[in-house]
Amino acid sequence: MAKKLDDIKKMLGEKKMKLVLAAGVILGVGLIIISNTFPKVSDDTNQAENLIATEKSTSDTPLEQRLKALLSKVNGVGEVEVFVSYASTEEKLALKDKESNGSEQTILKSSSGNTEPYIYKSIYPQVEGVIIVAQGGGNDDVRSAISDAVAAVLELPIHRVKILKMK
């Protein structure tokens, strides 16, 4: 191994050898950084499967119900179904009391014989996209009115709202 390294040094010269080694190190570090930047395909697949399973098991959210009720009253829309995709789930923050020793204790409340944490703040998830299936979804004017209304009320870019015609 040492003989081969000496032969390479003679061919390239001392300066070029150092440049080749430095380039190799930089290339190696770059490949490590790039490989850690991109998620593994299997992780994405598992996340997608979990998301689909979660969304199938849940009933209409209050937002979906309100959109459905509102859109069904719009002229030309007809019967409507709404699906909202969220970035995460709702987060509830419980009120905590700091003890004199520095530890925290969750404050509980009792209602109807049940004891549960006192929730002082709910953080609602960000909406990522909306799919609306409507009887009037085949009409361009109706589709435009629905997508404009939903994009405006949810502060979504128009490309995240999809309107489909109901069977």
Image (cartoon, helix red, strand yellow):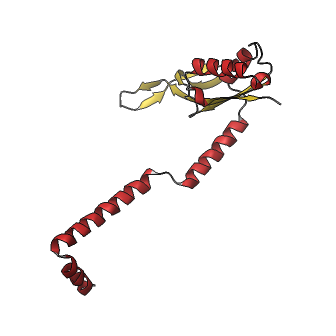
Residue extending farthest to the right is: 167
Residue 124 pos. (x, y %): 56, 25
Residue occupying the point 50% across, 24% down: 107
Q: Nearer the viewer, residue 134 or 51?
A: 134
Residue at (72, 37) in percent of width and height? 57
Report the residue at 27% width, 64% height from top.
Answer: 23
In the visual, does 6 lie left or right of 53?
left
163 vs 7, left or right, is right
Depth check, front residue: 114 or 92: 92
Q: Is residue 86 visible?
A: yes
Q: How many marks?
A: 0
Q: Quadrant of the C terminus?
A: top right
The answer to whether residue 112 is seen in the rendering is no
Quick check: 96 left or right of 133? left
Q: Which quadrant of the view contains residue 77? A: top right
Task: Give residue 97's position: percent from left, percent from top.
Answer: 43, 24
Q: Determine whether 53 is above or below 7 in the image.
A: above
Place of residue 76 in the rendered image (x, y in percent of width and height, measured from the top left): 78, 16
Q: Quadrant location of residue 27?
A: bottom left
Q: Nearer the viewer, residue 122 or 86?
A: 86
Q: In the drawing, does residue 92 fall left or right of residue 102?
A: right
85 to 50, vertically: above or below: above
Q: Quadrant of the N terminus?
A: bottom left
Of all residues, the one furthest to the bottom in this rendering is: 3
Where does residue 42 sit, x and y in percent of width and height? 58, 55
Q: Is residue 43 above or below residue 54?
A: below
Q: Residue furthest left?
A: 14
